[in-house]
Amino acid sequence: MAVFNKEGLFVTKKGKYQVDDLVTKLSFVSGTYLAEFLQSIGLTIPRKLRMNVLSKVLKEPVERTIEERKTLADEMGYKLTWFSKFTDTQLVNLLEWYKSTSLGNLYLTGFWRDFLDYIVVKGVSDSDIERLFIEADNSIKSNKRPLTLDFNKSLNSVLYDENGEIDGVTQAQFRPVTYKATTLTELRGIGEKYNAPIPKRLKKNEMLQVILDKLKERNELTPDLEKKLKTQNIILLERFAKDHDIKVSTELKKEEIIEFILSNAEETKSTYFVPQSQEVYENLDEPVVKKEVPKPVVKTETVVEPKPMIIEKVVEPTVTPNVVVNADVIDYRPQLDKLTEAFTKLAESFKEKEFSVHIENSIRPEPVVAQEPLIKEEQVVRPQPTNMMVNQEVLIQELLREDDSDAPELDPEKPFEIDGKTMTKEFHYKRGIGVLAALLSLVFAVGFAWVSLLSFGLLIAPFLVEANQMVADLDATMKLVVNYGSIVLSLVNLYAFIKLLGKPSMKSLKVLGVITLFTGFIITGLLVFASIGSKVQVVEQKEASETTKLAEAIEKISHPDSKKKVKKSRGFMFFLLGFITFVLLVFVVFYGIWRLEFTYGYENIPFIGPFLRDSIIEPLFGSAHDMSQYYV
């Protein structure tokens, strides 16, 4: 006889089994086979077992749905407030209403887990259990779990109710929960389930037969009464049935359907009682939806304190005459010293070479005309200075400050001249920003490739359980869009990555920028546009004048290293790309070792196998035992 040992393993004569592995395999067994198996060993299952599993699985989704619909006055939101009192049929139908593959899988695994406990308690023989396990091994090869609707329909034939119960609840519980939280379609389904089918509209012969059957059960049928009833029309038959408390009508009301089921089902026929009032459909601790009462807002009166009056005394500023600084006070000696050093170095570098410097100055100073003082002099209102002397260093810095406010604006499309050189602006690719955009494109390409592999079911790992389930829940159209749309987006980002690492033109960058705005979640496209720059290029250089040559010589002497080209090392970029590629290759190799069939048994390799399994594979991807509760 099978038992559970202290380690939680399921033990039979033929061996020990991990419960999680067994539950996963058994969840692929069809409901038809399970019903036939139970009938072959003469065992039935209490309906409460299925109801308990469904209640546990649906509890959290129902709570979320009630919270989402609490502000809506819809029928489904009210029905779900009766969830804790649902019958077996209502729970089965609610599972199908959610249309969730993940909930269906949780229900199947939960049912088989409780079923294992049940067969241990019932003492099912090891040979029968092994027969069930063999069927599980065969069913798992199809890699397709049975539909929960078909599974539950097949299971109905081997479920039983406790004495005096119907559909998992008592008559007192059945009346209000079905009256408040079921549809007529569900009630007719319950009637068929318990061999009490309810026709939508009764004909005369059908109504007569129902009345005769009910009178026979009560031992009230006589030959004369039967003959009389057969001669009456359908209206008189309805009247007779109503007078004799026989629930039958051409159009049954909801409560009449409920009473018809209870009075005709084998499970409740012997204990059936006629309700004395309509209250039997209203009570049973009807759930009350709490309404939030708005809290009274306490208005606090703000006390306005009188502000003290501030009397401001207006003090007129003292008017001082303009300060005239004598030019003789300015000291130009530091600047002259720098010029002297520059010319000295120039003379030493050229030594005996002679230069004839001819300075042309086209700007002629205008003669200064002394103006007569105006009668009304404009005076500047300034604070009273504490020191009438002006700082010489500040004045010198102000005179030597570069001011570009009067600089002419340059047309980027037309050549322009600077210091005798003809220049133009040309396109310049900002490689640093472009490489950053390329790396982002690579990240998005890998991400969309991951989504594509995930949608085709090629990626399986413990941290991908929810993602795989989200893909599995998609309908056929959305799954098709995800399958091939992610491939296209991955290829586009990969093309952008390769193009940005090369030498793209301005036109190609603009096209890539527009495309990656959509395929790279905007940020990649913005970086691509940011990588478009310009630089000034010398087109034609006129012969420099003597003055220009002298200025360039002084500049070279003062800043000898200003025009040295410094080659930027690209070693870091190549190292980064190589490192990323190496990490991806290592990840793919380890994933292949863990996932592919031809690598099974790698842990048996001496020393390397256990190290890979314990230190790398299981911490990164998880063990096959952990994965058994999600996948096969």
Image: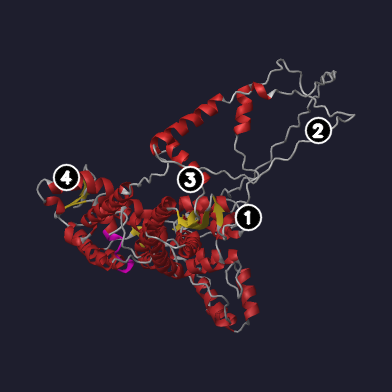
Q: Please, what secondary structure does the residue beneath circle 1 have?
A: loop
Numbered mark located on residue 216 in the image? none
- Residue 66 sits inside the magenta stretch: no
Measured in 3D between alpha carbons, the distance from the residue under mark 2 to the one under mark 4, in whole angstroms, is 99 Å
Which amino acid, mark 4?
A: Phe
Circle 2: is it few (<14), some (14-19), or many (20+) Cα within 10 Å?
Answer: few
- Which range is magenta? 25-32
Please give the name of the residue rendered at 50% of the width and 59% of the height, measured from the top-left corner.
517
Q: For mark 2, what is the residue?
A: 370
Q: Please, what secondary structure does the residue beneath circle 3 have?
A: helix
Q: In screen coordinates, is 590 left or right of 95?
A: left
The mark total stands at: 4
Please give the name of the residue rendered at 38% of the width and 44% of the height, measured from the top-left corner.
564
Measured in 3D between alpha carbons, the distance from the residue under mark 3 to the one under mark 4, in whole angstroms, is 74 Å
Q: Quadrant of residue 282?
A: bottom right
Measured in 3D between alpha carbons, the distance from the residue under mark 3 to the one under mark 1, in whole angstroms, is 86 Å
Q: In screen coordinates, is 419 left or right of 399?
A: left
Numbered mark located on residue 549 in the image? 3
Q: Position of residue 78 (x, y in %)?
A: 59, 55
Say how the picture is coloured. secondary structure
Which amino acid, mark 2?
A: Ala
| Pair 4/1: label in front | 4
Question: Which label's residue is closer to the chain start, 3 or 4?
Answer: 3
Of 23 and 203, the residue lying toward us: 23
Please give the name of the residue rendered at 55% of the width and 62% of the height, measured from the top-left corner.
182
Q: Position of residue 110 (x, y in %)?
A: 35, 54
Measured in 3D between alpha carbons, the distance from the residue under mark 4 to the one under mark 1, in whole angstroms, is 58 Å
Residue placed farthest to the top in the image? Answer: 386
Q: For mark 4, what is the residue?
A: 611
Circle 1: is it few (<14), some (14-19), or many (20+) Cα within 10 Å?
Answer: few
Of 261 and 200, the residue lying toward us: 200
